[in-house]
Amino acid sequence: MDTRTLMDTFTDDVLEAIFPAARSDEFFEALFGDPSEGSYDIRLRFDGYDRNSSTLRFNLELHERPGCCLVCSLTYGLPQVFARHPVINLKGVVREIEKRLPGQAVCSDWRLEPTRQLDRSCHSIPLVIAVQAG
C-alpha cells in the first residue's frame, strides 16, 4: 500500500462520513443523558501506514469544547471505554475503513493505544489496524 494513495483515500470528508461529528453528542447523550455535558468533540484522523508492522494508523482526536477543560477530563481511561462502547462502534469504524480498501487490504485486527496529550486542548487515542494483502 502506498501512503500517498491512502492519504488521498482517507480525506477529512471520508473520515467524517466514517465517524460523523454528531457521534460525539450521541456518545455523551448515552453516557450522561445530555450531550452538553461532554467536554470534547471526537474526530477521526488518518495518521499513516507502517509498512514494517503492516498497520494503518488513525487517531481519535479529542478536541476541547469551549468553556470546558479537557485536561480535567478522565481521558486516560477512554481507550477501554471506546473499545467497547456501542455508540463509538469501533468495529463498525474498522469495517468502514476496510470498505475503502477494496482489493488492497483486509483489516485483520485492531487495537487502541493509550491516550496521548498533544496539548492542553487536544488529546489523541491511536487506533492501530493490522492489515493483510487483499
Image (cartoon, helix red, strand yellow):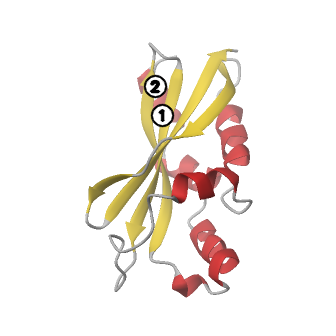
Instruction: Find residue 61 and report its horizontal and vertical position in percent.
Output: 43, 56
Q: Amino acid at mark 1?
A: Arg
Instruction: Find residue 32 and report its horizontal and vertical position in percent.
Output: 63, 82
> In this rendering, is residue 129 above or below 105?
below
Work out whether residue 38 can be spotted. Answer: yes
Tell me, yes or no, whether the two marked residues, 1 and 2, touch with CB atoms within 8 Å.
yes
Location of the C terminus by quadrant is: top right
Q: Residues within 10 Å of mark 1 (few under 14, many from 20)?
A: some
Work out whether residue 19 can be spotted. Answer: no
For this rendering, which residue is in front, 73 or 53? Answer: 73
- Which residue is most to the left? 119
Left or right placement of residue 32 versus residue 70 in this view: right
Q: Which residue is mark 1?
A: 57
State the image quarter where residue 96 is shown: top right
What residue appears at the point 56 percent right and 66 percent down from the top-left corner? 21
Q: Secondary structure at mark 2?
A: strand
Instruction: Find residue 113 and report its horizontal and vertical position in percent.
Output: 48, 41
Q: Which mark is residue 49?
A: 2
